[in-house]
């Protein structure tokens, strides 16, 4: 004997009668999709013309002998590239700079965001001070750094005042520290704002319950706040990694085409290779750099996905 299940009268009234379940899109929905695609076409055409097609051209150049002959040589260009001492120096310097500067700017920005998230006086003033480097033009940045770190600049004058010897900041191993400080000065404010926005979105009721349970500020940060900040940390790390490759502009204006060897980066190598019309070498270096970025960003996204699953659980 079957038992009838009771249903809600409101649900039965709202349920459509005499209509079968519809699959696919209606004519109106297809028209809206077509109209949306039509308005997106200029952007798609621009991306295809200026990004996707040139990328495939770069891959093609990295696999041929010369642009005029077009003879396929496979990985010979990559083999010669990794035998090039300038490329190995540039790759090592760029990797060392990214490994050093990117975690440093993320940690310092997070520390500043946590500090300003508390009830400290003059919060808006400090926020403006850290954000001000973002609006300074590159030419002004170079002028400031030349005034500070030139052999006869402010820093060496202060060192001489205290009895020390002047340092060739931009023509010695100390140039690496100058570039790191320049990168931190330019990017720490933007990252700090990202972290402050993420901290403001953490549910306050969870923080208040933890405070009532006697959880201290350090434990609240590592047990609660850090878990909610995992996605923001991944985003800021990826953006900082991308920005670490943009520091070439300032270094180039400071030191020119051929800086001291500790300041010689992949961008210097590519710029000089392009100036010498060595397109095969340039294309091979671009493909290698792209693969490295794909692996690093993929790893960061994988870690962020695992951290997000842990937070959901």
Image (spheres, rainbow, N blue to C red):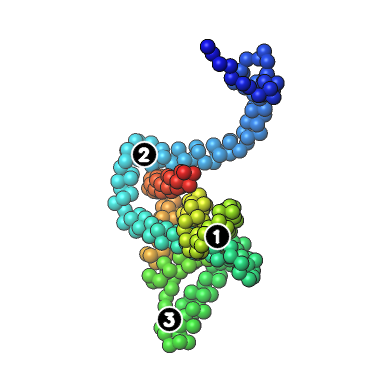
Name the residue: 51% across, 62% down: 214
Q: Which of marks 2 and 1 is nearer the N terminus?
A: 2
Q: Tell me the distance, in whole angstroms, between the alpha carbons under discs 2 and 1.
A: 64 Å
Q: Which of marks 2 and 1 is in front?
A: 1
In this picture, residue 54 sits left or right of residue 208: left
Between the residue at mark 2 and the residue at mark 3, the CA separation in whole angstroms equals 49 Å
Callout 1 touching callout 3 (CB < 8 Å): no
User: Does residue 95 appear left or right of residue 9 in this picture?
Assistant: left
Q: From the image, state whether disc 1 or disc 3 is nearer to you.
A: 1
Q: Is residue 172 above or below residue 281?
A: below
Q: How far apart are marks 1 and 3 (CA)?
A: 56 Å
Q: Is residue 116 left or right of residue 306?
A: right
Give the x, y percent position of residue 240. Answer: 49, 56
Does residue 13 appear anywhere in the picture? yes
Read off the residue under disc 1.
212
Element under disc 2 = loop
Residue for badge 3 = 166
């Amino acid at each position: 004997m079957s038992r009838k299940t009771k249903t809600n009268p409101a649900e039965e009234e709202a349920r459509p009668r005499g209509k079968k379940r519809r699959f696919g899109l209606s004519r109106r929905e297809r028209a809206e999709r077509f109209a949306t695609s039509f308005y997106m076409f200029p952007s798609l055409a621009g991306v295809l013309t200026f990004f996707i097609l040139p990328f495939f051209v770069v891959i093609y150049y990295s696999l041929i002998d010369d642009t005029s002959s077009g003879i396929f040589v496979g990985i010979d260009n990559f083999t010669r590239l990794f035998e090039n001492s300038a490329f190995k120096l540039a790759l090592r310097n760029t990797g060392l700079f990214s490994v050093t500067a990117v975690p440093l700017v993320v940690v310092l920005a997070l520390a500043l965001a946590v500090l300003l998230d508390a009830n400290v006086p003059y919060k808006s003033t400090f926020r403006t001070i850290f954000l001000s480097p973002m609006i300074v033009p590159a030419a002004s940045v170079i002028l400031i750094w030349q005034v500070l770190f030139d052999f006869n600049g402010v820093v060496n004058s202060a060192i001489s005042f205290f009895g020390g010897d002047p340092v060739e900041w931009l023509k010695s191993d100390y140039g690496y520290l100058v570039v790191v400080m320049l990168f931190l000065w330019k990017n720490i404010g933007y990252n700090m704002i990202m972290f402050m926005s993420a901290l403001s979105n953490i549910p306050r009721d969870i923080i208040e319950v933890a405070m009532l349970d006697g959880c201290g500020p350090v434990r609240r940060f590592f047990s609660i706040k850090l878990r909610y900040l995992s996605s923001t940390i991944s985003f800021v790390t990826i953006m900082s990694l991308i920005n670490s490759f943009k520091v070439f502009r300032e270094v180039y204006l400071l030191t020119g085409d051929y800086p001291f060897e500790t300041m010689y980066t992949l961008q210097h190598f590519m710029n000089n290779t392009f100036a010498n019309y060595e397109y095969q070498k340039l294309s091979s270096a671009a493909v290698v750099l792209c693969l490295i970025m794909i692996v690093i960003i993929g790893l960061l996204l994988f870690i962020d996905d695992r951290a997000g699953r842990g937070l959901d659980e």
